[in-house]
Image: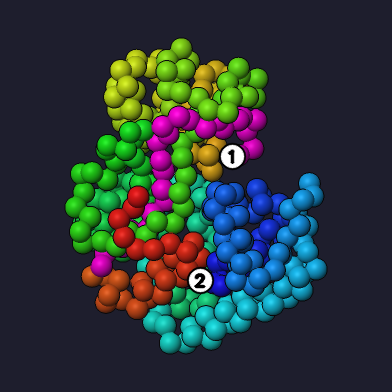
Amino acid sequence: MDLFQLKCFLSIVRYKSFTEASYEVALSQSALSKHISKLEDELKVKLFDRSKRQTELTPAGQEFVLYAKTILNSYEQSIAAMKKYAVGGILHIGSIEHMGRVGLTTPIASFLNLFPEGEVEIELIKGDTVTLMNQLGARKIDMAFIAYITSARKDISNLDGFDLAPYHLYQLVVDDYHLVVSRSHPLAGSSLVSWEQLTGEKLVILDKSYSLNALLRHSFRQMGLNPHIAFECDQVDTILGLVEENFGVTMLSKRIAMTRYDVVPVPMEHPLSRNTVLVVSQDLEQKRKLAQHFVQHIVSYFQGEPGEPH
């Protein structure tokens, strides 16, 4: 039994849905089910009645809610109690856009709440992944939340031009790029879309200031396809607005596409992958206690592991 399993369990209890809970804990529904099954195997009881349309707790599950909450509350209290041993200061952290949509704002806020007001400060610098990696190399920022993107055939990525040896890379959120279409588009009901099907579509995509642009073009070339790119810009909201009006289709990660716009994300065959990764200098992480605490807090929240992104 681990803390993340308890978080998964309580998230399902809160939403009464494996699907909704999977979004909160940043897992696929199948991965979430595996965590719960592992927890049930260890407890030797069934926590949920899966035979009904709406997820319901079994009698054992109802009793276990109290224990799960108690364990997590004790953990949070222990973290809060240890804050007096932490060294205050300021962290200069780079971040890609759409932090909230990939679940970064909550753990950052909870980290700051561990300290008395004014003891710890985070200066957030927004930018694209390439710019943030360059700033890391120049030591202008301490660490960065970036988007690690790989092409459809996984042969190139947006980090290929960087020496990653001096850094720890912590994978936080795994996502795939989806085709995003209006609800009235003929492909909206598809279970899977091929790249060949996109050659007859008008594409509206992020411009060349984004790594995604080059990787999309590379993926089409790799498959011998000639896409019709009708519009490019640097604003996700503009692109989603055009898609909602049925002026073309786009390619975005599912999490970013899930907005107030009336659009539908459709899975792609051989999709580009987009992993949200925390990159931090190994030297800085070893020498600065505040940086260590921040990394541990973020990784604990997402249950990630250090190493090369994959």
Percent across and percent down for residue 160 are 23, 44
| Closer to us: 44 or 91 | 44
Whether pointer 1 and pointer 2 mark residues with C-beta atoms closer than 8 Å, the reply is no
Residue 195 location, x and y as percent?
42, 22
Check disc 2 and report the residue beneath it. 112
SS class of the residue under badge 2? helix
Q: Is 291 situated above or below 305?
A: below
On screen, 304 above or below 79? above
- Depth check: give the residue in front, 277 or 43: 43
Q: Quadrant of residue 158?
A: top left
Q: Who's the residue at 64% across and 54% down the image?
A: 21
Q: Which mark is residue 50?
A: none
Between tags 1 and 2, which lies in front?
Answer: 1
The type of colouring in the image is rainbow
Q: Is 94 rendered above or below residue 108?
A: above
Q: Which residue is mark 1?
A: 258
Residue at the far top: name it: 200
x then y, percent, for residue 33: 60, 55
**Crowd around label 2: few <14 · some 14–19 · many ≥20 (10 Å):** some
Front-lying residue, 148 or 87: 148
Looking at the rendered structure, the kind of residue marked 1 is Met
Task: Quadrant for the N terminus, please.
Answer: bottom right
Residues drawn in magenta = 258-282
Left or right, 187 with respect to 197, comes to: right
Residue type marked 2: Leu
Question: Element type at marker 1?
Answer: loop
Q: Residue at x 73, y 60 (%)?
A: 48
Dot 1, crowdedness within 10 Å: few (<14), some or many (≥20)?
some
Verify whether residue 171 appears in magenta.
no
110 left or right, relative to 69: left
Is residue 274 visible from the viewing direction of this image? yes
Which residue shows up at 50% across the image and 70% down it? 111
